[in-house]
Image: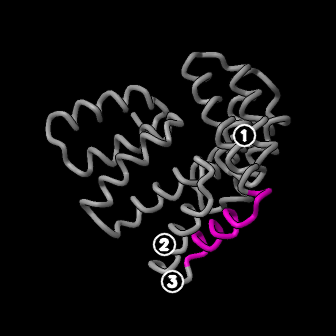
Amino acid sequence: MLGRGKTDAALRCFQKALLLQNEPEDTFHLALALLGLGRYEEALGYLDKVAAQKPGREVVMLAQADCCLMLRRWDEAEATFVRLAKLRQGSRRYIDYLDLVRDPIRRDRHVISREFFIEAQRLLEAKKHREALEKMQEAFEMDQNNALVANNVGSLMLLLGQSPAEACPFFEKAVAIEPDNERYRENLSWLRRKIKA
């Protein structure tokens, strides 16, 4: 459910699971659902509990850093990304995150883009597709290097009946940003076949 954009339903499931067995994995998944809903302070509280139970887990640290970033706790986010970069020596991903968090303009644009993205997701769940597209386009304007947002803009354009030629640049952008993402490549390939037909 969490991976399919049904964050509210996933949250309820993880809350029930936590009541039944209180395992660190359930706590972590609950925190991810809260993160997906933009409830960062709550998510961080649960992530801190998991980190205390399972110290040094990379995925938990990354989620903590993400929460701090979204809460605009720049110093905490930077400190966590520094720990992650040390944990994964030479990881381009964490070096990129450090560059992001240290650049006031980029980090603000990134956070605002994510906020627009979450609002677009809420609008999609409410079946308000046109409004969701507008929010997703705002997210893209704030962060044009986000492949997920670019792909979603293109998908929403098609859903709303816009021409494949208009949507194509967004799918191309997603593939340019993340060339190894099979879903983005498949979407672009499918769209190009549709345009040629």
- Regarding residue 28, the answer to whether it shows in the image is yes
Number of numbered discs present? 3
Task: Assign a secondary structure to mark 3.
Answer: loop
Q: Earlier in the sequence, mark 3 or mark 1?
A: 3
The residue located at (33%, 49%) in the rendering is: 28
Marks 2, 3: nearer the viewer: 2
In front here: 189 or 139?
139
Q: Is residue 99 magenta?
A: yes
Which residue reaches farthest bottom?
89
Is 90 displayed left or right of 96 in the figure? Answer: left
Hey, what amino acid is under mark 3? Gln
Vertical arrangement, residue 171 with respect to residue 176, above or below: above
Q: Position of residue 138 (x, y in %)?
A: 78, 35
- Bounds of the magenta segment: 91-106
- Residue 56: % across, % down: 34, 70
- For disc 2, the marked residue is 84
Residue, disc 3: 89
- Point out the residue furthest to the top here: 127
Question: Which type of secondary structure does the marked residue at label 1 adopt?
Answer: helix
Is 157 on the left or on the right of 51, as rendered? right
Residue drawn 59% across and 56% down? 181
Q: In the image, is residue 90 above or below residue 151?
A: below
Residue 172 in sight in this render: no
Question: Eyeballing the image, is 79 above or below 131?
Answer: below
- Image position, residue 157 (x, y; %): 75, 29
Name which residue type carries label 2.
Leu
Look at mark 1 in the image and give the residue it sits on.
Answer: 191
Figure quadrant of residue 19: top left
- Label the magenta part by its dominant secondary structure: helix
Looking at the picture, tell me which residue is in the foreground, 197 or 158.
Answer: 158
Residue 158 bears which disc, if any?
none
Q: CA distance from mark 2 to mark 3?
A: 8 Å
